[in-house]
Image (cartoon, rainbow, N blue to C red):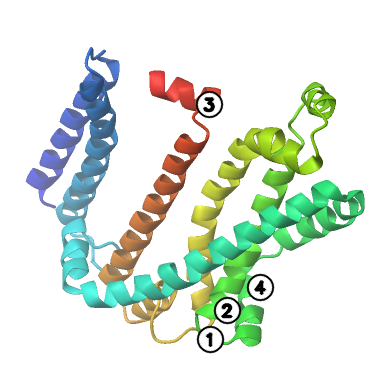
Amino acid sequence: MNSALLIGAIAFWLLAWATNEWLVRRTFTSSSMARAARLAVPLLFGITILVLWEGIVRAFNVPSVLLPPPSMIWTRLINSVPTLWADFRQTFLKAVLVGYALGCGLGFLTALAIDRSPFLQKGLLPLGNFVSALPVIGVAPIMVMWFGFDWQSKVAVVVIMTFFPMLVNTVSGLAATSSMEKDLMRTYAASWFQTLVKLRLPAAWPFIFNALKINSTLALIGAIVAEFFGTPIVGMGFRISTEVGRMNVDMVWAEIAVAAVAGSAFYGLVALIERAVTFWHPSVRNARTA
């Protein structure tokens, strides 16, 4: 065991912990400094995890087939950019984005139809509950048989996974408007569409964006899992399953890193759009003034 590496990693962890404690407890008079501190805390925490990972793996000589060090994963990532880009384009740009747009869009439109029809509310929502309980491992092979091995079958899986969260959250958001507010719109002789656009839909935006953020991660998970059951020789799920069989664990971790960064960026983009659209909501106002 290399004691120097282990001691160095632990010392860095303690120093980073103390720095983060100082940053979170300090009150900054400048808004730019406060924003920089909020960004520095998670960044320093992430670097600390990587340093600890590197130090522990190298100090105890852990075999790379079990857990490669971050430096080895980074080298593989840099040397495999063309392959990683092709996998990212197949999985994320095709299956995830297309399936996400279709699933969320269909869920939103179905929620509007349910809101207009009590029959659909009593008949379609229980069916949606049933569909949402279907395991992706069981659905993915069926979608591959129906739509083929290319990205279209992965889109179908993503649509199934993202449809119900959007449906339920939109229905709940449309029902969140109080009776007094609806009565006020009726006194103005507002139609159903005018009430929807000017009152009920704005009130439902927090619910809708909650579904969009949940689906941003579900879509990526569904697409990657679906690729385990049949895909062309490209894609994140295909690469992970193939490289695990070849014991190239560093490549597996490189794919995981790309997926994690892509999923986090997608989630962050949706959150930024939410802050711009729901700037009036108390949670957004409190976050800005904090």
Q: Quick one: label 1 or label 3, which is nearer the N terminus?
A: 1
Q: Quick one: label 4 or label 1, which is nearer the N terminus?
A: 4
Front position among marks 2 and 4: 2
Q: Quadrant of residue 126?
A: bottom right
Question: How far is mark 2 from mark 4, CA to CA?
Answer: 13 Å
Q: Which residue is mark 4?
A: 138
Q: Name the amino acid type tagged 1.
A: Phe
Spot occupied by residue 134 in the image (x, y as percentages of width and height): 71, 64
Q: Nearer the viewer, residue 185 or 4?
A: 185
Q: Quick one: label 3 or label 4, which is nearer the N terminus?
A: 4
Q: Which residue is mark 1?
A: 149
Q: Is residue 18 visible?
A: no
Question: How far is mark 4 from mark 1, CA to CA?
Answer: 16 Å
Q: Residues within 10 Å of mark 2 (few under 14, many from 20)?
A: many
Q: Name the amino acid type tagged 2.
A: Ser
Residue drawn at (20%, 35%) of the image? 13
Question: How far is mark 2 from mark 3, CA to CA?
Answer: 40 Å
Q: Which residue is mark 2?
A: 153
